[in-house]
Amino acid sequence: MALGVLLVAPALASATSPSGVVISQLRLRTAASQYDEYVQLTNTGSSTVDLSGWQLYDCYTSGGSSRIGTDGDRLPSGTRLPAGSTFVLGKNAGDYTGTADASYTFQVTEAGGFQIRDGGGVVQDGVGAGGTACAEGTGLTFPTTGSDFTFTRHGTDTDDNAADFGAPSGSANGTACGAPCVAPPQPTAIDAIQGSGMTSPLVGQKVSITGVVIGVDNQQGVSNYVNLDPRQAGIYVETPTIAQDTNTQTSEGIFVGGLAAADRAASHIGQTVTVSGTVTELFNLTTLDASGQTPAFTGTAKAANLPAAVTIDTASARAQTVASSGNRPYYETLEGMRVTLPSGTLNGGGTDKFGETFLQPDAPRKRVFRDAATPVGPADQVVLGQDAGSADVDPTNPSETPASTTRVKADLFDKVTGATGPLGFAFSQYQIQPQPGSPKPVVVKGPTTYPPDAPAKAAGQLRIANFNMENLFGVGMTDDGHTFTQAEIDAKTTRLANAIKVLHKPDILAVEEVASEDSLKEVAAKVGGYQEVWRPSTDARHVAVGFLVRNGIDITDVRQLGVDATTTESGCQDAGVGTKLFERPPLEISVKVRDTRFTLIGNHWASQGHPEACREAQASFVASAVSGLENFGAQVVVLGDLNDFEDSTAISSDLVAETTLRNLWTKAPAQNRYSYSYNGMLQTLDHILVTKGLWKQTLGLQFVHFDNDYYERNETTSPTKVSDHDPPVATLALG
């Protein structure tokens, strides 16, 4: 979550707290987690203080200046703090490990601080690092290592943080106020909570609702790859049909999150529920956060009690204007309600590894390609999720896809009919959640057949491919908190080997995301007839670039490029702050095939999460290397997961500058030009470029879509979904 979403003018810290409420304790991290932070308030006065509308602000540095901002909710009306009591604001659920009275979503770094303001915007107290707008007097120095992280106020408020708090000691959690501070929930209609806009007009307020349970979502999200976020598991509740109003701009449904497993069981579907909680926007899904609450269920759980599902109107869906956040006005009026999609077409690829099936309502079969003007996909796009019938996330392996009873398995251009369930919102997409025990959506098979087509080599030809192997680790290595077992690595290398066989065993493959040379050797052995080349990287996850080369092809001049290269561009590092241009240095090899000699440079550039300037700098470096080789008469192939698009400046301009490199992407059939799918749109991140002499010898390029066009067949043997990238395969005529 970005810091300081709402920017405000820095306010001067108060001389003393006007209300007597001060920041009495705070922590910005623990030894185990940089996200385990909180702020504790104490009422030092002699009477209860009304905290209605109070808001927590954070200080941070941007553009060389200290800023103050917030994306924390205002405290609900009726919140109060008795004399001598403490009140805890903790970083959102899954991050702060203690018990909080309220939460905030921004993160405060060790160079920042906190400020608490009342409902009128008056600063009550502030604590921060020296030089920040939150600091009073001499600021604090927040530790980044060790075991002492908690600052505790040891005296009265003298407006000097260093004097008032002293040194940190231990990592104690704050003491929540609990019931004495809680604002009483107000019975509220669901449509009043939803409002007519993209966000609820009642955010931050404590309310109570009554409605019919129309569905469940029993999968908790994973926060920071470490902690589960229980707010993402709960039930969907809709106003009974007889009580719904006629305003089509306000939804009659809502998601209730933070519930215990027993309270989000499918056995409650059809029952009436009364539950209270705090209205929040959970990643743009209007949610009643009922963490710690116990819902009251009444009545019989039967399908006859469910409100009639609203049929998604194709014309209204296509006429929507899509916001950059993914919000779509027509779908927003149905958020949280029970809906049905009579027919939808998979135009953006098959069911992905997260169990998401991207559909266009009642649409003809036509691939959806990346559109820079609409980065979150077509206006009418809707997703079928699987969370209602999935097992919970395994905290020891958050990257593993949980088993599900409601997952739809479909390929590109299949059609899905009769998808019914609550309409949620996640990852910039509206998602229908089919429910356990309900009729399953029906998949109508389309023209996509398995296995995918791949070019076969004829006599006198050479085939070169690129293959991002996605997280090929070694036994005992750890990623995202999970340690890989022998069985997992055996299955991974078997699937990768089978994928290479589907490609008809290209002569040369550049490979990426390989963290273990032993595992790459195992792939080579299972395919048979290959020699491997690999060098370690400085990447935080240890993934690096390598090659698989058919036996009989001479390999010379193996070297990594740019190992010590630096950059002045910021934000280019996957972990922490640094100046390295490449965390995964390019790998160069020279080969001789019959009478043809050339050099290959394998690449894995900075991901799309990094600034474009980082990839532009990497492209310029590689272009210089190619230029030097061409000056000596060499022919060059540049290939890899470049993490950028064919029309990007890095590839279309910087990489080809001062060289004869040309992108073979243009030689692929128009409907075949994609290697990746994001937000239900097909796009190209994997490229093969060749210099002038090799361009004349190139007969064609084809992307082999065993990832994007298919649902996962078998997770121990099938190449489908073994990677999140499709390999491009180039065919060259030997001289």
Image: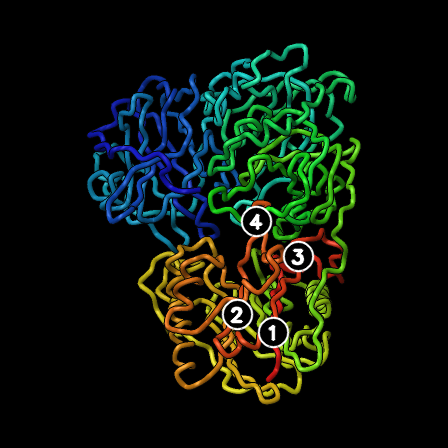
Residue 637 numbered tag: none
In this rendering, does residue 253 appear at all?
A: yes
Q: Amino acid at mark 2?
A: Leu
Q: Is residue 66 left or right of residue 47?
A: left
Location of residue 13 in the rendering, given as x and y in whole percent from the top left corner: 23, 33
Which quadrant of the structure image shows residue 464? bottom right
- Indicate which label's residue lies in the foreground, 3 or 1: 1
The reply to whether callout 1 and callout 2 are in contact (CB within 8 Å) is yes
- Whichever of labels 4 and 1 marks the residue nearer the N terminus, that label is 4
Q: Amino acid at mark 4?
A: Phe
Q: Residue at x 35, y 38 (%)?
A: 4
Location of residue 47 in the rendering, given as x and y in whole percent from the top left corner: 33, 17
Q: Looking at the rendering, in which quadrant would you find the N terminus? A: top left
Viewer-nearest residue: 220 or 551: 551
- Whichever of labels 3 and 1 marks the residue nearer the N terminus, that label is 1
Q: Looking at the rendering, in which quadrant would you find the C terminus? A: bottom right
In this rendering, does residue 473 appear at all?
A: no
Viewer-nearest residue: 382 or 130: 382
- Indicate which label's residue lies in the foreground, 4 or 3: 4
* Residue named by callout 4: 369
Callout 3: 10 Å neighbours few (<14), some, many (20+)? many
- Whichever of labels 1 and 2 marks the residue nearer the N terminus, that label is 1
* Residue named by callout 2: 639
Measure the alpha-carbon separation of dots 4 and 3: 16 Å
Q: Amino acid at mark 3?
A: Asp
273 above or below 517? above
Q: Amino acid at mark 1?
A: Ile
Callout 4: 10 Å neighbours few (<14), some, many (20+)? many
Dot 4: element: loop
Which quadrant of the structure image shows residue 472? bottom right
Dot 2: element: strand
Measure the alpha-carbon separation of dots 1 and 2: 9 Å
